[in-house]
Amino acid sequence: MTKLYLFDIEGTTTDIHFVHKVLFPYSFEKMEEFILGHKNMAPVIEAINQVIQTVSEEEGKELSLAEVIEKLKFWITTDRKHPALKQIQGLIWDSGYSNGAFKGHLYSDVLPFFKKIIAQNSMIGIYSSGSVHAQKLIFGFSVFGDLTPYISYFFDTKVGMKRDGASYLNISKATNLSPSDIHFFSDIPQELAAAQEAGMRVTHLLREGTEKSEFTGIKSFDEF
Ligand SMILES: [Mg+2]
């Protein structure tokens, strides 16, 4: 029997467009106000200095604070994975979630499925390339309220990349479960292949716009 149900987020529990259509635009809109309002806060100072350093190395330019803000906004539009941007976005999203500007999107079949898993005494885990902190925000401030009490484990790329079989072995070690006790759900066939290679059972989530694969597919958890 499956002891741990392990979920990808984007394209599996959550609309793949949530990050790009809700979170990114929100951080873009709030960037200037947030930095000007928190420019004496240690993690903000640290991020500002990282941007100045990167641009100095790459372009040989010393940015003013206004230019740092513009650069961060530009990096949002190009989806640059810079630690300073991630840090500031994380802080902006914290405040957006906690003041109710938006809620973490979850498909309507997720909560009933979580309840079913808990009722059969199995556990729920999350494995996403978004940080554990970001995962906890999506589930903690979700459209269905705080679902974090349902979730036993949160994993991000600290255990490895999602298309690498070794990452799934790391999850099995971290949970003290055999890979065969774990069932992984994702919208990405390469991730399913990596999990299956590690010995997990897998199911392909075929949300709207996702192409079928060689893996068993479901359109919703109601079908599982
Ligand atoms: Mg996904």
Image (cartoon, helix red, strand yellow):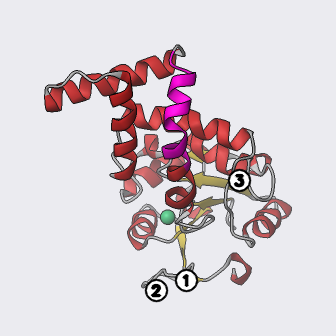
How busy is the neighbourhood of tag 2: few (under 14 within 10 Å), some, or many (20 plus)? some
Q: What SS does tag 3 mark?
A: loop
Q: Quadrant of residue 133?
A: top right
Looking at the rendered image, the quarter that the C terminus falls into is: bottom right
What residue does disc 2 label? 212
Q: What SS does tag 2 mark?
A: loop
Q: CA distance from mark 2 to mark 1?
A: 7 Å
Q: Is residue 127 magenta?
A: no
What residue does disc 3 label? 103
What residue does disc 1 label? 217
Does ligand 1 reach within 8 Å of label 1's beta carbon?
no
Viewer can see residue 153: no
Say whether disc 2 or disc 3 marks the residue closer to the N-terminus: 3
Does ligand 1 reach within 8 Å of label 2's beta carbon?
no
Looking at the rendered image, the quarter that the N terminus falls into is: bottom right
Above or below 7: residue 108: below
Say whether disc 3 or disc 1 marks the residue closer to the N-terminus: 3
Is 14 on the left or on the right of 158, as rendered?
Answer: right
Secondary structure mostly seen in the magenta stretch:
helix
